[in-house]
Amino acid sequence: MSDLDIFEEREIIGVALRYARSIDTKNFDLFMSCFTKDALFGLPKLRMNPEMKLELALPFLDSLFGATQHVTTNFEVTVNGDSAAMRSLYIATHVWREQVSDPLFVMGGHYEDKLVRTDDGWRIHDRLLVNAWFTGDRAAIAAAGMAELFD
């Protein structure tokens, strides 16, 4: 791997780390800086597109959870000119704002990202969250609109 490839890979991984930090710090501008304006985002059965307003994702999560901690690891990056693909693993811990039977909602799986190089650096153009498991209050998860995790 050349130095340029290592630099590109590090910049792309930095986008994933910035995404996790933006959610956990509730930093809207940082969150939006991870994506292209026309980005797709979501789970296989619940995909957000530009018409669904990606900018509503962080306020929605903030309304449900008092705190979160996203851990992202095992980065696999492939760069092809001005586009790239990245697969990484995640564990996301969420603390419910409201009292539910289990105060924690934890999920784990992997991200499948497609990124593009922009004038402002690498940005996610398509982020698919492939959930492998979750723990927590199933009724609260369903009431929050995330019942697709049960499939």
Image (cartoon, grey):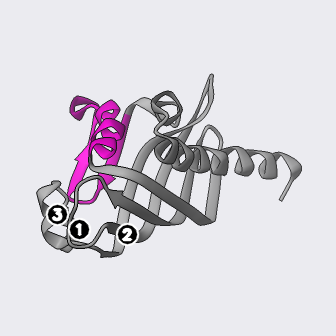
Q: Position of residue 80 (x, y in %)?
A: 63, 47
Determine which of the numbered discs, if any, sits on residue 140 in the image.
3
**Which residue is drawn at the image coordinates 27% and 42% (left, top)?**
63
**Which residue is drawn at the image coordinates 56% and 57% (left, top)?**
86
- As displayed, is residue 90 above or below residue 32? below
The 10 Å Cα crowd at callout 1, few under 14, some 14 to 19, many 20 or more, is some
Dot 3: element: helix
Stretch of the chain drawn in magenta: 39-63
Give amino acid for label 3.
Ala
Which label lies toward us, 1 or 2? 2
Q: Position of residue 31 (x, y in %)?
A: 48, 36
Q: Which residue is mark 2?
A: 107
Give amino acid for label 2.
Met
Left or right: 30 as drawn, with respect to 82: left
- The residues bearing labels 1 and 3 have C-alpha atoms spaced at a distance of 12 Å
Quadrant in which the C terminus appears: bottom left
Of callouts 2 and 3, which one flags the residue occurring earlier in the amino acid sequence? Answer: 2
- Going by the picture, which residue comes out furthest to the right? 3
Q: Position of residue 147 (x, y in %)?
A: 15, 64
Q: Which residue is mark 1?
A: 149
